[in-house]
Image (cartoon, rainbow, N blue to C red):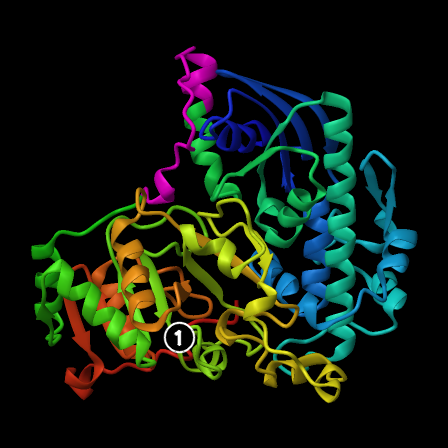
Amino acid sequence: HHLSHAASAFFPSPFKKSMILTIDGVGEWSTTTISSGYQNDIKILEEIHYPHSIGLLYSAFTYYLGFKVNSGEYKVMGLAPYGKPKYEKVILQKLIDLKDDGSFKLNQKYFDYSMGNKMINDKFEKIFGIPSRKPETENLTQFHMDVAASIQQVIEIIILKITEYIYKKYKCDNLCLAGGVALNCVANSKILSQKKFKNIWIQPAAGDAGGSIGAALSIWYQKLNNSRKNSKTDKMKGSYLGTSFKSNEIEEAFLEVNAKFKKYNEIDIIKLTAEMLSKGKIIGWFQGRMEFGPRALGNRSILADPRSAKMQSELNLKIKFRESFRPFAPSILSDEKENWFDLNTSSPYMLLVSKLKESKKIRLTQENLKLEGFDLLKLNRSVVPAITHVDYSARVQTVHEETNKRFYNLLKEFDRITNCPVLVNTSFNVRGEPIVFSPIDAYRCFMGTEIDFLVIENFVLDKKDQETSSFISYKDKYELD
């Protein structure tokens, strides 16, 4: 399991030689492994075994905070900036024995995942003095935000100790990351700011899905001994590895559901979409090959104008049907990133977090600075409020002409109209639903939400043109994620 994670990170990376760190919940017995990669070979060097697991520790807090294990972990990461890490010391004193080299053991008397049917037990709840949150009936409070901030900080401390140990012991400039914990883009950015490794590369499908790539590449290079050619760029092709649909397939699908559509050439599609976005319209954008991994990277995306102060709450409540605190990611022209963010490296897979440049922030009053919790959502804190989290951070996707020309051209045209090379980019789905796969999936999501326009390849559908009998109740179709 961990070899497949390591292979998924090292073999598509641009490195001839690299250290590889894989961290997840559990795979067979390993939960954390350190490996070395050289040319077409990987050697696993050090391991931490179940039940001691960073992934399961984070999942225990996901459960405690009332989110769904194995899918709600990113909510904990999104909630953390609303709180203060008040419980960091308690976690480090009672729940985990952490050594200076990053090795650790979890105190099993507080956890129930090995012997019981839930993540934690009563002793865990007694540490914090409050029982686990019931998501259907209990609102999130400042306490929950502080707990989220605390576990996020602890995870970062552990990961930084491990990466420092790897750098000191193995003296390699390159680091590859995989495993579900490598999707914690806040922690990834802390590794980058640690400035130990010159280069870091993270597998975009860092979770178990990426193991399929790793397994195939491990056989290709390690078993069959094929030579590995090095290149300056990674070999994931922008992670656009999924299915695409031909024009006649799309048209047939639309005719089947009696959808009303217009067809344009590529230049006009870009102009029209950028114009609609600049006027505050929300667009379902379905182009080319589907992304591989959990992030929408501009081919199965819902796009919107980041300059709108109301867009973040509108997208959460009317389109995604999810909690109002959830942040949205920006997609930006790759050559504009340093003008807008404190980011001097590419982030094509939305796996790094960066702070907004001072010049793009709006100065807050002393009164505003006293606000806490979800009251922070009311503040207009930057010129692109829809993608600015409460701590001025954003999970950035840099868009490159060579991997996604159409999306790059759309951003270019939007920038020409608005002087803003950034778009809100969220996955084309609602809460609890997979990202849309086919034109029909996209049409159903379009018709069941308040998305204004659907743009599939060169076809454009205006919500106002569709027959009202085609509208479907979509909000309650999927469970909480």
> Residue placed at 43% from the left, 74% from the top?
320
Magenta stretch: helix, strand or loop mostly: loop
Q: Which residue is mark 1?
A: 477
Q: Is residue 360 magenta?
A: no
Q: Is residue 326 above or below residue 102?
A: below
Residue neighbourhood size for the residue with mark 1, other residues' Cα within 10 Å, grouped as few (<14), some (14–19), many (≥20): few
Q: Position of residue 401 (x, y in %)?
A: 31, 47
Q: Is residue 78 above or below residue 5?
A: below
Relative side of 15 to 55, left or right: left
Segment colored magenta:
218-241
321 relative to 341 in the view: left or right: left
Q: Position of residue 315 (x, y in %)?
A: 43, 77
Residue drawn at x 48%, y 15% as measured from the top left = 222
Q: Quadrant of the N terminus?
A: top right
Residue at left offset 37%, top offset 60%: 435
| 279 or 221: nearer the viewer | 279
Quarter of the rendering containing residue 163: top right
Residue 240 is left or right of residue 195, and the answer is: left
Image label count: 1
Asked whether 238 falls inside the magenta stretch, the response is: yes
Q: Residue at x 36, y 47 (%)?
A: 400
Under circle 1, the secondary element is: loop
Q: Is residue 132 visible?
A: no
Residue 34 can be seen in this image: yes
Q: Toward the viewer: 408 or 462?
A: 408
Q: Position of residue 103 (x, y in %)?
A: 81, 35
